[in-house]
């Protein structure tokens, strides 16, 4: 599936088995998005707001 980056309009690839709430990152500008809705192969994304700077590792 493909979504459009809200920042730079690039196509952002979303895995076909993506689930709502999954975080995806624009390959062009690095913006983080969250899968908001899935409909018949169409994905809607929204800006991920709750991402904290938790670098894990
Ligand atoms: Zn982008």
Image: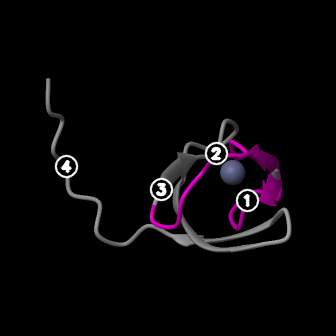
Question: How far apart are the two marked residues, 3 and 4, measured between alpha carbons?
Answer: 17 Å
**Residue at left 18%, top 35%?**
55
Q: Main secondary structure of the magenta part?
A: loop
- Assess whether mark 1 and mark 4 are in contact (beta carbons under 8 angstroms): no
- Assess whether mark 1 and mark 2 are in contact (beta carbons under 8 angstroms): yes
Tag of residue 22: 3
- Answer left or right for 32 relative to 28: left
Q: Between tags 2 and 3, which lies in front?
A: 3
Residue 24: image location, x then y, percent? 55, 49
- Answer left or right for 53 relative to 44: left
Question: How far apart are the two marked residues, 4 and 2, measured between alpha carbons?
Answer: 17 Å
Q: In terms of sequence position, does the residue under pointer 4 or pointer 2 come before the other?
A: 2
Mark 2 sits on what residue?
26
- For the magenta stretch, what is the residue range? 2-21
Q: In terms of sequence position, does the residue under pointer 3 or pointer 4 come before the other?
A: 3
Mark 1 sits on what residue?
5
Question: How far apart are the two marked residues, 4 and 1, measured between alpha carbons?
Answer: 21 Å
Q: How busy is the neighbourhood of tag 1: few (under 14 within 10 Å), some, or many (20 plus)?
A: many
């Amino acid at each position: 599936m493909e979504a459009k980056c809200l920042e730079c309009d690039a196509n952002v690839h979303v895995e076909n088995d993506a689930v709502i709430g999954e975080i995806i990152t624009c390959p062009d500008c690095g913006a983080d998005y969250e899968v908001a809705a899935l409909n018949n192969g169409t994905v809607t994304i929204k800006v991920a707001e709750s991402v904290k700077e938790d670098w894990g590792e």
